[in-house]
């Protein structure tokens, strides 16, 4: 039976330490989250981010625009926040409505306030093997969780299922930096289960892919980034926990695995930006 990678527990530890750090600052860091439209999942995420920040003593504001805001209005707001000395960190919650170019929006955020690490400057740094201002939150949280449990990455075969800019692509680079052998699979990959069978570490961030115990190598480490509600309203991930936990040595649950670590990383990144920009 696999050991649980407990993201909730590690989040509490990280937030406890961060709270003391924030208390020692003369001014409070400030995180501004922009939410466009009424996506119910996004609303929950954004409120969690705000609440967690406020509990740490980080000023946090959510700016909620109607879904018919123009791209230009949104870009103007980001420029205003870029120039506001009281704003430490800017996060534009994704996805955005279709009439707004995600690329234009992300390109407008100042790299020094880019708490997601999504701007071309920060992505470019990451993909060229040097240091971005901060690392993207979900991959960062995954590595913190693996490190907490002493899981060795060097020389190991890590298979990532999913090539999104939020998880798969940046995680591939961060695992390479740690000397893992990295395979990135996606919806068009052939022989997906053969590839997964060779993995020492499996990260599933594909959305609707179901990974079952029989697809896994015995003793592998499973990280589940998926999150959705099943037909009974139960929160589930990409991985069939019942069967996978019989085969794996470590497994992250949903909920309580990667989700809390993403929030913890966002708080870490906000504080890192504060320290870098006030130094
Ligand atoms: N939507 C889902 N995950 C994320 C994230 O990490 N950052 C942003 N900005 N939007 C998201």
Image (cartoon, helix red, strand yellow):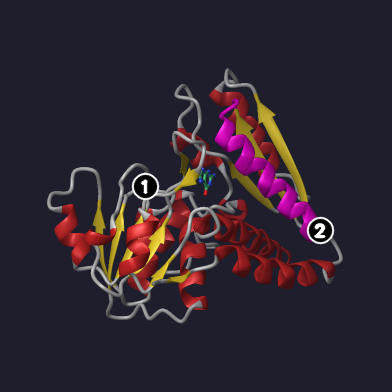
Q: Does the magenta stretch include residue 44?
A: yes
Q: What stretch is highlighted in magenta?
A: 37-58
Disc on res. 152: none
Residue lying at 34% horizontally and 42% vertically, measured from the top left:
208
Picture mark count: 2
Q: Nearer the viewer, residue 110 or 57?
A: 57
Q: Dot 2 surroundings within 10 Å: few (below 14), some, or many (20 or more)?
A: some
- The 10 Å Cα crowd at callout 1, few under 14, some 14 to 19, many 20 or more, is few
Q: In this view, does 56 lie above or below 73?
A: below
Viewer-side residue, 192 vs 26: 192
Up-down: is 43 above or below 19? Answer: above
Q: Which residue does the image show at 19% across and 43% down from the upper left?
A: 188
Mark-to-mark CA distance, 2 and 1? 32 Å
Give the camera-side residue of 227 and 268. Answer: 227
Quarter residue 10 falls in = bottom right
Left or right of 29: which side holds 166?
Answer: left
174 or 226, which is in the foreground? 226
Give the prevailing secondary structure in the magenta stretch: helix
Residue to which mark 1 is pinned: 164
Query: Quick check: can you spot residue 127?
Result: no
Name the residue that disc number 2 marks: 57
Spot occupied by residue 33 in the image (x, y as percentages of width and height): 66, 42
């Amino acid at each position: 039976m696999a050991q649980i990678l407990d993201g909730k527990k590690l989040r509490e530890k990280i937030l406890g330490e961060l709270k003391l750090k924030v208390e020692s600052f003369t001014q409070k860091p400030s995180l501004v989250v922009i939410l466009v439209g009424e996506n119910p999942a996004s609303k929950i995420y954004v409120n969690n981010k705000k609440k967690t920040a406020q509990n740490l003593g980080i000023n946090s504001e959510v700016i909620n625009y109607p879904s018919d805001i123009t791209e230009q209005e949104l870009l103007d707001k980001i420029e205003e926040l870029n120039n506001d000395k009281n704003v430490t960190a800017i996060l534009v919650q994704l996805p955005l409505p279709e009439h707004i170019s995600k690329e234009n929006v992300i390109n407008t955020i100042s790299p020094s306030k880019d708490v997601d690490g999504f701007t071309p400057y920060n992505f470019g740094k990451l993909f060229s093997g040097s240091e971005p201002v901060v690392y993207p939150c979900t991959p960062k949280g995954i590595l913190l969780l693996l490190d907490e449990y002493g899981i060795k990455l060097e020389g190991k075969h890590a298979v990532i299922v999913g090539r999104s800019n939020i998880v798969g692509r940046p995680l591939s680079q961060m695992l390479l930096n740690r000397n893992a052998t990295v395979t990135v699979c996606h919806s068009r990959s052939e022989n997906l289960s053969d590839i997964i069978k060779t993995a020492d570490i499996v990260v599933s961030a594909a959305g609707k892919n179901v990974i079952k115990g029989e697809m896994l190598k015995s003793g592998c480490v499973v990280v589940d980034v998926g999150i959705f509600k099943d037909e009974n309203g139960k929160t589930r991930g990409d991985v069939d926990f019942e069967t996978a936990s019989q085969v794996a040595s470590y497994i992250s649950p949903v909920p309580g695995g990667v989700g809390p670590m993403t929030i913890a990383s966002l708080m870490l990144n906000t504080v890192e930006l504060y320290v870098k920009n006030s130094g």
